[in-house]
Amino acid sequence: MTLGVAGSLPTAGGGAGVLGQSGEPLVDWDWVARHTDDVWEAFTEHIQLTAIAVGLGFALAAAMALVARRWRWAYGPLAGLCGILYSIPSLALFGLLVPALGLGLVTAEVALVSYTLLILLRNIVAGLDGVDATVREAADAMGYEPRRRLALVELPLAAPAILAGLRIATVTTVGLVTVTALVGEGGFGSLIDNGLSRDFPTPIMVGTVLSVALAVTLDLAFVLLERAVTPWARAGRGRRG
């Protein structure tokens, strides 16, 4: 991004100081107008990093869930491994990955994917385990083979739990993407990092507000998606109420 070029951003008040105490406004709208291309680039990068991480994380978690479904004893070790990855602080994880993978997209995505696995694995397994045994027996009686039963019966019924996991993982990843600015990526995090390095509040505010707005928007999108694809779940909750 062009924001990193020396002199492309002014320092607030002409020198170092506490943000917001130098007389500069928190948001310089003239700067925003001049850097709309950079803000858009940060937005698209943030979306791409999030989508890749959640997509790869879901694929890996789904594979692990199927393994755990076939061999129940495997769930404990798999969940334990994912739990260890989830518990590593992001800065420490980058410190482990950078010497091996260097700076850039691969390091960012390996870290981001690692933080999605536990959430997704637990929700996929919980969703599949929540399918009533009588439903499986009815599907077997109708001649469904295991794979067909999984695809056409169990996965649709497990959709609320799976979508809830995707929702949590996506919103969490949107926040974590900002940290990947440390390895040369970052989306809106690159704006925040640039503003901090120059003691200039505008890109910090823009990056922060847009990151939060993106997280809220995606969260609402998943709520609407769940309602659209699982109308029976909403009807069931209404009857119980």
Image (cartoon, helix red, strand yellow):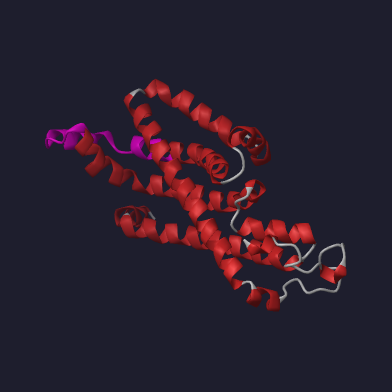
State whether the magenta stretch is mostly helix, strand or loop: helix
The magenta segment: 123-146
Which residue is located at x 54 percent, y 46 percent? Answer: 105
Left or right: where does residue 83 sit relative to residue 230? right
Which residue is located at x 42 percent, y 37 percent? Answer: 60
Residue lying farthest to the front in this orientation = 6
- Would you identify the image quadrant in which residue 46 lies? bottom right
Q: Quadrant of the N terminus?
A: bottom right
Magenta span contains residue 124: yes
Percent coordinates x, y for residue 40 in the rendering: 55, 67
- Residue 126 appears in the figure: no
217 in relation to 178, above or below: below
Percent coordinates x, y for residue 28 in the rendering: 72, 75
Left or right: where does residue 19 sit relative to residue 53? right
Which residue is located at x 78 percent, y 61 percent? Answer: 198
- Would you identify the image quadrant in which residue 85 lies? top right
Percent coordinates x, y for residue 29 in the rendering: 69, 77
Percent coordinates x, y for residue 191 in the rendering: 66, 61
- Residue 109 appears in the figure: yes
- Between 124 and 46, which is closer to the camera in this rendering? 46
